[in-house]
Amino acid sequence: MAQLSPVKPALGRTAFVTGGAQGIGRAICLRLARDGYDISIADIPSQKAKTEEVIKEIEAYGRKAIGVTVDVRDAKQIEAAIAETVEKLGPNLFVSVANAGVTQVKPLLECTPEFIENEVRINLLGFMNTHIFAARQMVKQGFGGRILGAGSIASYRTAENLGPYGATKFAVRGFTEAAAKEWAEYGIRVNAYGPGIVDTPMWDHIDAELAKIEGISIGDAKALRVKRDIKLGRIQEPEDVAKLVSFLASEEGEYITGQTIKTCGGASL
Ligand SMILES: NC(=O)c1ccc[n+]([C@@H]2O[C@H](COP(=O)([O-])OP(=O)(O)OC[C@H]3O[C@@H](n4cnc5c(N)ncnc54)[C@H](O)[C@@H]3O)[C@@H](O)[C@H]2O)c1
């Protein structure tokens, strides 16, 4: 088997990350920049200030970074964001990360059609359309690529009060398998990362909503689950997730495709 090249293969290549302004997406942007990629940070307009901060951090690593605004509920905006990325950073899109997602916390009997539709449009339609527009660009370029998406431990086991969320994350796992089968012939590997309880604004939101439902104090829902469920004894940091993404994007992951890989400190056991 050929030896891996010591030269960073990421140099001169671009990674596109949705929901890159904060949380897990931000950590992925920074990690992929450290790996040598130029980064396109795709997020909603209200995240402009945070996006600018991430751009500065990436530039400090000596890599290029741009911000592109996108609401992943609108497929046309995703298509435009990828086109803008290629126009500004060159036709070198090698990694796409469909990371943007929301969690809405409600008992199923209280979920409205609008509530469910919003979650599906962001977590599932946005995810699938990001993958497809990225893959079209990669196929056009002709040198393969790496497509990643945000799954969750909820891709394998859903939780009460998070029903629609869990359904979208199960679907992430299914689509990841199908896309991996179809795009292997183009040298594109497709995988998803499945975090557990990560210390991001999303979990602050889940905690606050669970506190209302369970009649407990803010902070307690998260603290209880971290103590009870995480075998490695600490909450997950966004950087823990970024390490897996970096691995899957790299040559080290060259034989892995179609997988939703849990990274959760044992929380799913
Ligand atoms: N935090 C966790 O514990 C956890 C666990 C498992 C999976 N995940 C998944 O990881 C991903 C990132 O989670 P996070 O914790 O960093 O969340 P977060 O809420 O901290 O960040 C989400 C990002 O997505 C962006 N976003 C939201 N709606 C968007 C839209 N319509 N279009 C474009 N961007 C949009 C937000 O502006 C934000 O920057 C999500 O898909 C989430 O489901 C998170």
Image (cartoon, rainbow, N blue to C red):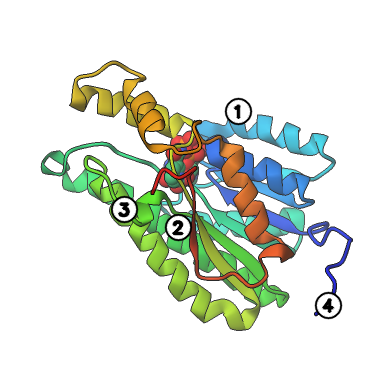
User: Helix, strand, or loop for circle 1?
Assistant: helix
Contact, mark 1 vs mark 3 (Cβ under 8 Å): no
Circle 2/circle 1 CB separation < 8 Å: no
- Labelled disc at residue 157: 3
Occupied quadrant, residue 220: top left
Q: Residues within 10 Å of mark 4 (few under 14, many from 20)?
A: few
Q: Which residue is mark 2?
A: 127
Q: Which residue appears at 10% of the width and 42% of the height? A: 109
Lower position in the chain sequence, tag 3 or tag 2 = 2
Q: Check disc 4 and report the residue beneath it.
A: 2
What is the residue that sits farthest to the bottom in this orientation?
185
Whether the residue carrying mark 2 lies under 8 Å from ligand 1 is answered with yes
Q: Earlier in the sequence, mark 4 or mark 1?
A: 4
The residue where tag 1 is placed is 49
- Rounded to the nearest angstrom, the CA distance separating label 4 from label 1 is 45 Å
Amino acid type, residue under disc 4 in the picture: Ala
Element under label 2? helix
Residue at the (18%, 48%) spot, across then down: 113
Specify few, some or many for label 2: CA neighbours under 10 Å numbering under 14, 14-19, or 20 or more. Answer: many
Task: Depth check: give the residue in front, 108 or 90.
Answer: 108
> Which dot marks residue 234?
none
Kind of residue at badge 1: Ala
**Kind of residue sitting beneath label 2:** Phe
Residue 72's spot in the image, x, y percent? 45, 51
Among the two numbered marks 2 and 4 on one chain, the one whose residue lies closer to the N terminus: 4
